[in-house]
Image: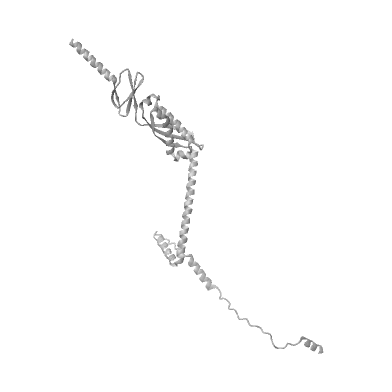
Amino acid sequence: MVEELVAAGVTLVTAGAVYVMAAARVVKQYERGVVFRLGKLRPEVRGPGFTMIVPGVDKLRKVNMQIVTMPVPGQEGITRDNVTVRVDAVVYFKVTSPAEAVVRVEDYRFAVAQMAQTSLRSIIGKSELDDLLSNREKLNQGLELMIDSPAVEWGVTIDRVEIKDVSLPETMKRSMARQAEADRERRARVINADAELQASKKLAEAAKEMSEQPAALQLRLLQTVVAVAAEKNSTLVLPFPVELLRFLEKAQQGVGAAPPAVPQPVQEQRPSLEPRPDRDSEGSNSGQD
């Protein structure tokens, strides 16, 4: 009798242990458990820790609540300004409602991936090339809204969407490089011309000041000589003022020129008062002879 009781006790303990082992479940901290009893969803969601289910009746499905990083394969498309590009992106999302993520969609990861690819192609067609290259923040926000709208019904929330890379054809890269080079050359010329204008104004002001003080020109000449001599060169270039050359030229012209002629006083001719012989009388005298 005692042996039978012991055997029955051992059997019960063994059956209990087997039942506990079959019914025991452990849900991790970053997971939530969704229980289906005879195929029907139970309203309560099992939290992290140790939990029990009815073996053979309940089925526990664990849902990861962590943020999932999903790369979006490169999508080729034509932008609004007719440029063929290839764009890569990455989507960050997480499950907010485990029950809806399990019931409403067969595979929420695959659904989010397909929606991300479709939205990325749509955003490429609505944008221009300059927006894809320089205005990515705005495109990221628009892409996030496009993916998040249907994902909310699946119990999934899109945390963030980022465009990783924009691949361009080689011909477009060369064209953009030439455009950037031309733009930089234009800005360099404008800056150089502006610098020349400012320098000319400053030089004009300096020349005006030096013209009022001739000694300033000589001081400036000495400063130039000191600056050149500081380089320890074997040849010293000494600039010669042009004003001094002009002064010497004027002095030479003054010495070599002939003295101006002194004007002579003009004598006034007055008519003679002596009588002139009459031509008729001379003619008559010659006839008489």
Residue 164 appearing in the image: no
Vertical arrangement, residue 259 with respect to residue 31, above or below: below
Residue at the image point whose x is 19% and y is 11% from the top: 3
User: Splitting the image into 4 quarters, where does residue 49 fall?
Assistant: top left
Tell me residue 125's x, y (percent).
49, 34
Tell me residue 143's x, y (percent).
43, 34
Residue at the image point whose x is 47% and y is 33% from the top: 122
User: Splitting the image into 4 quarters, where does residue 234 fall?
Assistant: bottom left
Q: Quadrant of the N terminus?
A: top left
Question: Between 246 and 113, which is closer to the camera in this rendering?
Answer: 113
Task: Give the farthest residue toward the top.
Answer: 1
Tell me residue 62's x, y (percent).
33, 25
The structure's colour scheme is one colour
Residue at the image point whose x is 25% and y is 16% from the top: 15
Task: Give the farthest residue toward the front.
Answer: 43
Q: Is residue 62 left or right of residue 78?
A: left
Tell me residue 26's x, y (percent).
29, 24
Q: Quadrant of the C terminus?
A: bottom right
Vertical arrangement, residue 154 with respect to residue 181, above or below: above
Q: Is residue 179 left or right of residue 159?
A: right
Task: Give the farthest residue toward the right.
Answer: 288
Residue 204 appearing in the image: yes
Question: Between 286 and 203, which is closer to the camera in this rendering?
Answer: 203
Question: Between 180 and 249, which is closer to the camera in this rendering?
Answer: 180
Number of numbered callouts drawn: 0
User: Splitting the image into 4 quarters, where does residue 103 fall?
Assistant: top left
Question: Between 251 and 90, which is closer to the camera in this rendering?
Answer: 90
Vertical arrangement, residue 203 with respect to residue 85, above or below: below
